Image: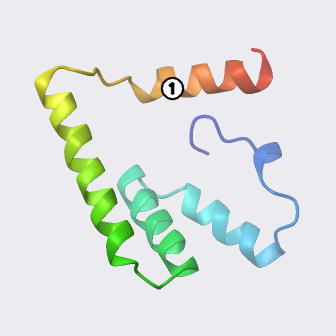
């Protein structure tokens, strides 16, 4: 099971089939899990609002520029997970 995901973290209202699919999905490599997650989220609202999509594209471009210019620094994923866990669980 991937780091940060424990069996107790699984949502209990899932059907058995959904829970089994989740376990299989969690065993995929990171890139495949990300692609799958993106596709699942996109399937929830198949309508595309051109204004919203354009706004997100602008925001993405702005954030990329901020990173490239050194205006902001990235934070390693393990640090983000640790901080989130501390905030959520006080550990």
Side of 45 where 5 appears, left or right: right
Q: Residue at x 54, y 56 (%)?
A: 27
In the displayed image of the protein, which residue is found farthest to the front?
Answer: 51
Element marked by disc 1: helix
Tell me residue 60's x, y (percent).
27, 49
Q: Give the quadrant of the N terminus.
A: top right
Number of numbered callouts drawn: 1
Side of 54 where 28 appears, left or right: right
Reply above or below: 59 against 35: above
In the displayed image of the protein, which residue is found farthest to the right?
Answer: 13
Q: Quadrant of residue 57?
A: bottom left
Quick one: 36 or 60, which is closer to the camera?
Answer: 60
User: What residue does disc 1 label?
Assistant: 80
Quick one: 66 or 43, which is closer to the camera?
Answer: 66
Tell me residue 40's x, y (percent).
53, 73
Q: Give the quadrant of the C terminus.
A: top right
Q: Quadrant of residue 16?
A: bottom right
Side of 24 where 75 appears, left or right: left
Q: How is the image coloured?
A: rainbow
In the displayed image of the protein, which residue is found farthest to the bottom?
Answer: 47
Badge 1 crowding class, 10 Å Cα cut-off, few under 14, some 14 to 19, many 20 or more, is few
Tell me residue 17's x, y (percent).
76, 78
In the displayed image of the protein, which residue is found farthest to the left?
Answer: 69
Q: Residue at x 59, y 21 (%)?
A: 82
Q: Residue at x 82, y 69 (%)?
A: 14
Q: Residue at x 44, y 66 (%)?
A: 38
Reply above or below: 11 against 6: below
Side of 4 where 56 appears, left or right: left
């Amino acid at each position: 099971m991937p780091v940060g995901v424990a069996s107790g973290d699984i949502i209990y209202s899932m059907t058995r089939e959904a829970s089994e699919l989740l376990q299989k999905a969690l065993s995929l490599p990171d890139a495949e899990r990300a692609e799958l997650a993106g596709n699942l989220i996109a399937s929830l609202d198949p309508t595309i609002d051109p204004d919203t999509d354009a706004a997100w594209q602008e925001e993405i471009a702005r954030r990329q520029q901020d990173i490239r210019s050194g205006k902001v620094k990235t934070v390693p994923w393990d640090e983000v997970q640790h901080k989130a866990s501390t905030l959520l669980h006080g550990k």
